[in-house]
Amino acid sequence: MELFSAEFFSALLAIVLIDLVLAGDNAIVIGLAARNLPVDQQRKVIVWGTVGAIGIRALATLVVVWLLKIPGLLLVGGLLLIWIAYKLLVEEKSHDVDAGQSSWEAIRTIIIADAVMGLDNVLAVAGTAHGSFLLVILGLLISIPIVVWGSTIVIKWIERFPVIIYLGAGVIAITAGKMIIDEPLIKDYFAANTNLQYALIVIITIGVLVAGITKNKQKKLADRS
């Protein structure tokens, strides 16, 4: 991928969107972990907890970017992303996080919670980066501050405009399709037929969105009855 090309910036935009949609709840976890501490300690805990979380997230994403170069793992990663995109639309998230009683406990809780909750984010970002470590780092540097310090605004936007979630799920589904197409083991089947490539991406994306919408409608009907 050429540096600072249209493809580069479109991938960067997709990474930032994925980070915001998938990592928005992590900001809530940060707040919950620090809630029992004195106000003067909360800011320090949030900053250091976030620094630790970013470090682990960046390292994990770079490792996954490297792993995706192994034959067969792009296909596996693409299939996992399809599930992640669907889960994003239908999963009801909970935030049962123990508040730390000391600064160190709160920082540790933030880092561990982010590492566990960020697995889907890591895979999605790594798939979108197309092997570019620079894209991974830039995406994190842009999106993490927004998530941490603008989390309230981001969450309100998502609650007010649910279409943002569907947009994020669509981007993840498109990324999944591209990963499957780029898988070295089956790449030759798609290389000679561009229409087949587009068809697969469209089928995956529409399939995820329709499945998510259908499941959510069924949930609403079940809640009413």
Image: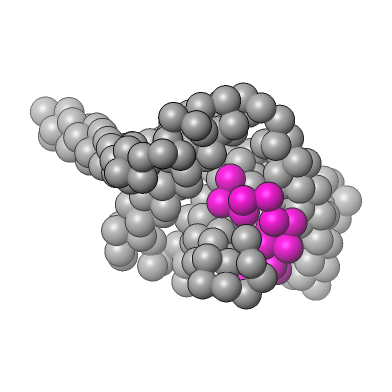
The image quarter in which residue 66 lies: top right
Image side of residue 70 versus residue 154, left or right: right
User: Residue 192: horizontal and vertical position, in percent?
Assistant: 41, 39
109 vs 147, nearest the viewer: 147
Quadrant the N terminus occupies: bottom right
Q: Is residue 134 visible?
A: yes
> Which stretch did the figure color magenta?
127-145
162 vs 211, nearest the viewer: 211
170 vs 120, nearest the viewer: 170
Q: Residue at x 29, y 58 (%)?
A: 163
44 vs 126, nearest the viewer: 126
User: Residue 77: horizontal and vertical position, in percent?
Assistant: 57, 32
User: Residue 70: horizontal and vertical position, in percent?
Assistant: 71, 30
Q: Is residue 161 above or below residue 196?
A: below
Q: Is residue 114 above or below residue 92?
A: below
Assign the magenta stretch its main secondary structure. Answer: helix
Colour pattern: one colour
Q: Residue at x 57, y 73 (%)?
A: 5
User: Residue 2: horizontal and vertical position, in percent?
Assistant: 64, 67
Quadrant the C terminus occupies: top left
Image side of residue 15 versus residue 30, left or right: left
Magenta span includes 62: no
